[in-house]
Image (cartoon, rainbow, N blue to C red):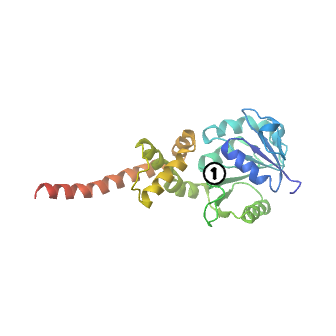
């Protein structure tokens, strides 16, 4: 463990996981707007208050996408020039825009999206979890230091722009969560004759629906490419259904 102090602002399901991961290498402080007591966190992690959480070398915001802009606006008076700021939102274009707007103009900022969560970390396969990183305004050496850190943590670091992330994510994470909620609405259940493919669909439903409905809404609402994804999905479903209608018409004329 180094002497570097890393703060985690937000202690929900992901914030708890992220604090535990960072605590293996840093002195970690955590803060929750709901309030925390010392016995709410594991030994070795420090509970901080709304001001003290900003006295650190690096700070990760682990809050809901829909509340992030408000959190940043309220945090601005406590921000320090020495602190490196990260977000961990599942979308990137809007959070980067908000950080540029609400954090002090000279802040060093790195946008990230750890592509895993409490239900998928550590991974059940040999495949490394991905870690998206976008350098917003951090110095090159500092950014490289954190890239090396996450790489050493056996994460597959992917460097890209916020727009590139959101475009890809809309058709991967966004569509997965959308279909998971569709499966849930259909009340899909295991049967005695499940194929492997159907079992995998049930796993998608279970994993995506274990996250909050707020996350589902935020993934669709704050990804600028999600609307197009849903349009493309609807067109493809109609196209596939139309091919079956041709067979139905042929059967009726026999």
The mark tally for this picture is 1
| Residue 222, position as x, y percentages in the image | 55, 44
Residue in front for this viewpoint, 104 or 201: 201
Q: Secondary structure at mark 1?
A: loop
Q: How many other residues sit within 10 Å of disc 1, few (<14), some (14-19) or many (≥20)? A: some
- Can residue 61 be seen from the camera position used here? no
- Residue at image coords 66%, 40%: 68
- Residue at image coords 51%, 45%: 220
Residue 11 lies in quadrant: top right
| Residue 43, position as x, y percentages in the image | 83, 45
Q: Is residue 216 left or right of residue 40?
A: left
Q: Is residue 228 left or right of residue 9?
A: left
| Residue 56, position as x, y percentages in the image | 84, 47
Quadrant of image for the C terminus: bottom left
Residue 53 lies in quadrant: top right
Furthest-right residue in view? Answer: 3
| Residue 21, position as x, y percentages in the image | 75, 54
Furthest-front residue in view? Answer: 192
- Can residue 37 be seen from the camera position used here? yes
Q: Is residue 38 left or right of residue 176?
A: right
Does 78 sit above or below residue 177?
A: above
User: Can you identify the residue that label 1 sits on?
Assistant: 117
- Residue at image coords 77%, 62%: 149
């Amino acid at each position: 463990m180094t002497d570097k102090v890393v703060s985690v602002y937000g202690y929900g399901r992901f914030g708890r996981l992220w604090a535990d991961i960072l605590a293996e290498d840093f002195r970690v402080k955590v803060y929750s707007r709901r309030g925390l007591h010392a016995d709410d966190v594991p030994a070795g992690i420090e509970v901080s208050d709304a001001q003290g959480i900003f006295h650190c070398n690096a700070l990760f915001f682990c809050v809901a996408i829909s509340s992030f802009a408000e959190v940043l606006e309220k945090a601005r008076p406590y921000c320090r020039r020495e602190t490196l700021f990260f977000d961990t939102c599942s979308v990137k274009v809007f959070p980067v825009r908000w950080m540029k707007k609400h954090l002090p103009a000279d802040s060093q900022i790195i946008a990230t999206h750890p592509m895993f969560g409490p239900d998928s970390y550590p991974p059940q396969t040999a495949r490394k979890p991905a870690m998206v990183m976008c350098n917003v305004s951090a110095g090159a050496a500092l950014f490289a230091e954190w890239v090396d850190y996450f790489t050493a943590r056996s994460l597959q670091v992917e460097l890209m722009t916020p727009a590139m992330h959101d475009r890809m994510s809309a058709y991967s994470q966004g569509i997965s969560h959308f279909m998971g909620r569709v499966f849930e609405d259909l009340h899909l259940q295991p049967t005695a004759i499940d194929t492997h493919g159907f079992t995998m669909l049930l796993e998608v439903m279970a994993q995506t629906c274990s996250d909050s409905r707020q996350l589902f809404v935020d993934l669709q609402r704050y990804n600028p490419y999600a609307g197009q994804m849903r349009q493309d999905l609807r067109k493809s479903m109609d196209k596939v259904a139309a091919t079956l209608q041709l067979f139905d018409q042929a059967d009726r004329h026999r």
